[in-house]
Amino acid sequence: MNPSLKKRFWADATVTEVGGGFEVLLDERQLKTPARTPLIVPTRALAQMIADEWAAQEAQVDPKTMPMTRRVNAALDKVAPQRAEVAAMLSAYGGSDLLCYRSAYPAELAARQAKAWDPLLDWAGEKFSFRLQVTNGIMHHAQAPEALEKLTAEVNRLDIFPLTGFHDLVTHSGSLVIALAAIHGYGEIGQLWQHSQIDEIWQVEQWGADEEAEATAISKRQDFCDAFRFFQVVSG
């Protein structure tokens, strides 16, 4: 999306097939990313989602209402030129995964973490033939190199479009394991998000939440779910 574009100038947003994928036309004009890369995507379903986002714009273009367009821009302009670096950054989350760092007290919070997080670690252990180790507190606890190597291999299997969706699943949740569970169909996406928010939910229960914090929490959850939809539509 061109950052200078603020007013709607087109009548129709349509999808057309091109060599190597699908693109969106605004009337007869080819849609491009902010870096002027032709916006060509791998599936017709994703192209149609993008076309629908542009068709839904009114007098002014609002990028906040265009999650699929924003992620395609990121895939083509940011992830594609540095795919190896992005994959390495995401793989590093395995060394400090949210699920591995537990509260020793209060006991109720520790029990909630164990109830939600232990099954996810057990699943990952069975799925990928390793199990990350758990510790209490926030001091770094080194994981076995072979476990991290297997996590890295899983991330490196992803092409630029799936990797872009996966990026947001990891960074929003703080957990490589939760993101892997999402893309492998282990658990419902809303519940996985709740599992990533156990500490935040606990704090709200103890101290309450203001309107701004609640709005931020809702926005983050929606972005997490949008990232999952993006991953699905570029992987199917």
Image (cartoon, grey):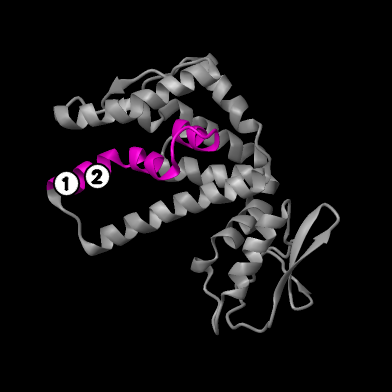
Q: Quadrant of residue 217?
A: bottom left
Point 28% across, 25% down: residue? 114
Image location (x, y in percent) of residue 205: 16, 46
Using the image, determine if residue 74 lies above or below residue 103: below
**Cα–Cα gap, marks 2 and 1:** 6 Å
Quadrant placement of the N terminus: bottom right
Point 49% across, 17% down: residue? 126
State if disc 1 and disc 2 touch (CB < 8 Å).
Answer: yes
Point 38% across, 17% down: residue? 133
The segment highlighted magenta reads 177-206
Image location (x, y in percent) of residue 209: 19, 56
> Residue at label 2?
201
Residue 47 lies in the magenta-colored region: no
Dot 2 amino acid type: Ile
Quadrant placement of the C terminus: top right
In the rendered structure, find residue 205 and report the number of the disc placed on it. Answer: 1
- What type of secondary structure mainly makes up the magenta span? helix
Camera-nearest residue between 14 and 154: 14
Residue 113 seen in this snapshot: yes
Is label 2 in a helix, a strand or a loop?
A: helix
- Label 2, residues with CA under 10 Å away: few <14, some 14-19, many ≥20: some
